Image (cartoon, helix red, strand yellow):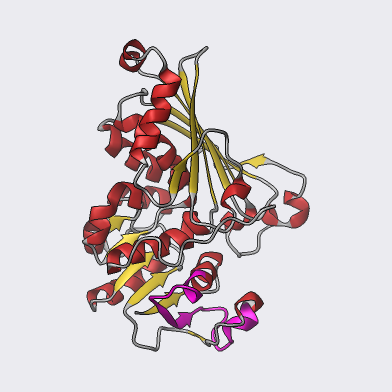
Amino acid sequence: MKIGIINVTGYAGAEVARIAYDHPEIELVSVTGRSGAGKKLSEVFPHLFKINLEITPEIETEVDFVFSGLPHAASAEALTTIVDSGIKAVDISADFRLKDLQTYKEWYQVDHPSPDLLKTSAYGLPELHKEEIKNTSLVANPGCYPTASILALAPALKHQAITSDIIIDAKSGVSGAGRTLSLKTHFSEVNENLSAYGVDGHRHMPEIAQELDNISDQACNLTFIPHLIPMTRGILATCYAPLSSDFIENNDDPKSKITEIYKSFYENEKFTHVVDQPPMTKHTLGNNDCIIYPTVDLRTNRLIVISCLDNLVKGAAGQAIHNMNIMSGIPETTGLTQLSLYP
């Protein structure tokens, strides 16, 4: 199967190219980029020197599948023509994640470029939406923070083990901000520093809320605070929620029951793993795993879930490849079995 990447010059696009190189069922034949047009891919990313492709302004070769790493709005515009022509695609931007048009406009300050296509797209979190992903031509790849947060809370909400009052404290490496130069990601600003941002509202918050509300069948009272930490890759989200009164009354050992619920919920999933001790971001460095540790603070009857992943793999490119596999009838783990890098 021949694939193309729109905007390969971003971190997510480059990571799709890296993973695609070793995928046995696909061939990367076309890469585009606005700033890098006319250059060899290896000139922009020397680590991809084995991929002998020129970056072009548009996809100029016939392809069977497309990944878009364009910014929001621009991605929807580019993909509309592609999907209408019968080519399947994964959008790594935020354009098809939010299902409500007014919510999209509120958070992204633009009218949605393709509302009709939005109606037929699927939210690309395979652990929760596998059947929809199988039966669509367009998948919205989830954001990195939402992936870690939703997977951390879905089992508890599904089993009504917690109330809807949820706090998510999440931390991300600097690559999550993308390649665009800015003062906040300057080495001297980030190194030996830790900062909260998006305190008054982060664009990933309504995406998390949308999915959690759907799982719980009610509106969650969500507080989401992201933080920037001085490392390149990785997300670690610590999520808190009170246990529901029914769950407390019906379980003498709530901690063991929570572990049982989580392990059962993800027992057939290939990339989400429930563990018995708190994970570290290095446990997911370079791989497509999300590692989850659920526990209960028995003093306060509060659920605590720690979730971590690589924001450029499970949080972006790896999940995009996973979605492509599902959409194309390829075994889910194909091209995605790499172990983490450690130390």
Q: Quadrant of the N terminus?
A: bottom left
**Count of residue discs:** 0
Question: 158 or 26, which lies in front?
Answer: 26
Q: Residue 94's spot in the image, x, y percent?
A: 40, 57
Spot occupied by residue 237 in the image (x, y as percentages of width and height): 53, 39
Residue 7: percent from the left, percent from the top? 48, 74
Magenta residues (range): 19-44
Query: Does residue 131 appear to the left or right of 65 in the view shown?
Result: left
Q: For residue 41, which quarter of the picture? A: bottom right
The question of residue 20 being in magenta is answered with yes
Residue drawn where x is 62% and y is 82% of the image: 49
Q: Of 121 and 287, which appears nearest the observer?
A: 287
Tell me where residue 38 appears, x and y as whole percent.
55, 89
Q: Is residue 7 visible?
A: no
Residue drawn at (41%, 49%) of the image: 107
Measuring 33% from the left and 58% from the top, which residue is drawn there?
A: 96
The answer to whether residue 241 is left or right of residue 188 is left
Look at the picture and state if 254 lies above or below 335.
Answer: above
Q: Is residue 89 at all visible to an observer of this figure?
A: yes
Q: Residue at (59%, 48%) from the top-left corner?
A: 283
Residue 132 lies in the magenta-colored region: no
Q: Say if 215 sits above or below 146 in the image.
A: above
Q: Nearer the viewer, residue 79 or 48?
A: 48
Tell me: residue 163, above or below residue 273: above
